[in-house]
């Protein structure tokens, strides 16, 4: 059975700024692009349940996470999603293993360590299991953050510019890893970025946001060909 | 060679230790509540909790007598439950010390909690943690330096409490004064050697506690930086 698509409509007014977008993301990678302040990160916060829109609906197939019109609001902890934050937000007081095991509340306690270790091995940082985040390099921290996010067997993956601070080579390695992992999971992934290079490496489809509105959407090659003016 | 009765210091240490536990429990609860920005009347609750900082200790003691005295509802209920009153007892001294030090403890813990990066809390929530788990596994461990600082300030404040303790618990608890009351008594009796010895001992205890708290806090910061 194919994984469900994400369908979301979001409307938020914050002073003068209005974010009014509709997203339709099938399994695969959707890059949401746009300049700073266009509302990209707000979209992710709303999808995750960390921010509440004035109006909107979020559904994964038949599973409704939010419907303001009907008063439906599934709390953050009950939405099965993976969120990799811009600053990664690894818990500094926990080892890499404990960070990854944190989201495994539905895995029997004795099995968590082995599963977390397997995930760390899968993303190439198994040797960091006992170490804390302050000792990680940028690339290592990204890999641990990816392993932690995917540990919940998510139905939706959200990435908020997690590779923005990395050099080109490391970024290419990690985007390849993300593509591999998402292909295995076969779920929708929404990736926020302002980098065309990153979108070219990752995206199946692209949604461009400008001043809170969708200005372009479609297959990655098609949309990216028309947005050469965006910052590389 | 003079002889010093160390029982007052021992009594003060017991009161301050118990008071520290009480204020840590209540202080953590109040701090979490006050960190919740949607709390109704948040600033009013904050002001009431902080009131002991600005009240003269005797006024605070008077309020405690009114609220916890034998004729008050709470005092009456307590006596009915436990068979002893709150006033003029060890319990009264712990309560007086706790109420006096609570605002300091709350302020320190709040600083610790508010210093926790919001993204870490958000990350825990997206990883399926319910609010209580987020608090226990992420917020409080990361706010530990604030908790330690609060505990130490609370302990030091409780160790030196004079006015409120004397109003609620009296000058003697089972015949023994607290260290600060002992110092005043001995000063009035012209026993300067006793005053000196007790003052020095409480200073050493207080400074040692602060020193170890600072080292512990520094180690925690260093460990996570």
Image (tube, rainbow, N blue to C red):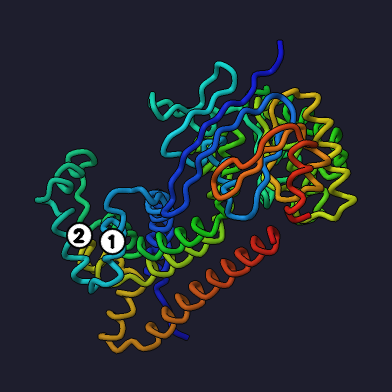
Q: Which of the two labelled residues, at mark 2 and mark 1, occupies the earlier sequence position? A: 2
Task: Indicate the chain on which mark 2 is placed.
Answer: B
Return the residue at label 1: B96
User: Is A45 left or right of B17, judged from the image as shown?
Assistant: right
> Distance between the Cα atoms at labels 2 and 1?
7 Å
Secondary element at tag 1? helix
Residue B8 x, y percent position in the rendering: 37, 69
Secondary structure state at the residue bearing disc 2:
helix
Residue A34, relative to residue B12: is it above or below? above
User: Which residue corresponds to the image point at 42% horizontal and 50% vertical from the top-left?
Assistant: B32
Q: In which quarter of the image is the N terminus of chain A?
A: top right
Q: In which quarter of the image is residue A101?
A: top right
Q: Which residue is drawn at 17% across and 46% down?
A: B74
B122 displayed left or right of A83: left
Return the residue at label 2: B64
Residue lying at 69% horizontally and 18% vertically, measured from the top left: A3
Residue pictured at 16% horizontal, 59% vertical: B65
Q: Nearer the viewer, residue A95 or A56?
A: A56
Looking at the image, is A62 positioned above or below residue A216?
above
């Amino acid at each position: 059975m194919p994984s469900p698509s994400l369908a979301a409509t979001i409307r938020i007014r914050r002073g003068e700024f209005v974010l009014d977008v509709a997203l339709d993301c099938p399994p695969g990678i959707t890059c949401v692009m746009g300049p700073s302040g266009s509302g990209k990160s707000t979209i992710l916060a709303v999808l995750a349940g960390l921010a509440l829109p004035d109006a909107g609906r979020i559904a994964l197939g038949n599973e409704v996470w939010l419907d303001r019109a009907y008063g439906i609001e599934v709390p953050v902890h009950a939405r099965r999603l993976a969120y990799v934050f811009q600053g990664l937000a690894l818990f500094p007081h926990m080892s890499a293993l404990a960070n990854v095991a944190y989201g495994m509340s539905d895995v029997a306690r004795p099995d968590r360590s082995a599963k977390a270790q397997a995930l760390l091995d899968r993303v190439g940082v198994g040797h960091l299991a006992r170490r804390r985040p302050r000792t990680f390099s940028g690339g290592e921290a990204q890999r641990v953050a990816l392993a932690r996010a995917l540990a919940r067997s998510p139905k939706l993956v959200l990435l908020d510019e997690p590779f923005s601070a990395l050099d080109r080579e490391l970024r290419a390695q990690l985007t390849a890893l993300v593509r591999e992992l998402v292909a295995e999971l076969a779920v929708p992934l929404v990736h926020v970025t302002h980098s065309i290079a990153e979108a070219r490496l990752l995206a199946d489809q692209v949604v461009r946001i400008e001043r809170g509105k969708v200005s372009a959407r479609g297959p990655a090659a098609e949309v990216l060909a028309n947005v050469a003016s965006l910052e590389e | 060679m003079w002889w010093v009765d160390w029982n007052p210091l021992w009594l003060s240490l017991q009161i301050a230790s118990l008071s520290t536990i009480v204020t840590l429990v209540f202080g953590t609860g109040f701090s979490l509540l006050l960190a919740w920005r949607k709390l109704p009347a948040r600033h009013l609750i904050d002001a009431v909790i902080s009131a002991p900082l600005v009240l003269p200790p005797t006024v605070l003691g008077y309020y405690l007598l009114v609220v916890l005295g034998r004729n008050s509802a709470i005092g009456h209920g307590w006596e009915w439950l436990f068979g002893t009153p709150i006033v003029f007892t060890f319990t009264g001294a712990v309560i007086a010390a706790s109420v006096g030090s609570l605002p300091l403890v709350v302020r320190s813990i709040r600083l610790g909690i508010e210093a926790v990066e919001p993204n870490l809390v958000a990350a825990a929530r997206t990883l399926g943690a319910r609010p209580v788990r987020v608090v226990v596994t992420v917020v409080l461990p990361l706010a530990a330096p604030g908790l330690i600082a609060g505990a130490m300030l609370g302990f030091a404040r409780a160790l030196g409490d004079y006015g409120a303790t004397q109003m609620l618990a009296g000058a003697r608890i089972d015949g023994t004064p607290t260290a600060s009351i002992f110092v005043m008594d001995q000063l009035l009796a012209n026993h300067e050697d006793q005053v000196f010895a007790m003052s020095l001992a409480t200073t050493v205890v207080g400074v040692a506690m602060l020193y170890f708290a600072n080292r512990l806090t520094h180690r925690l910061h260093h460990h996570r930086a």
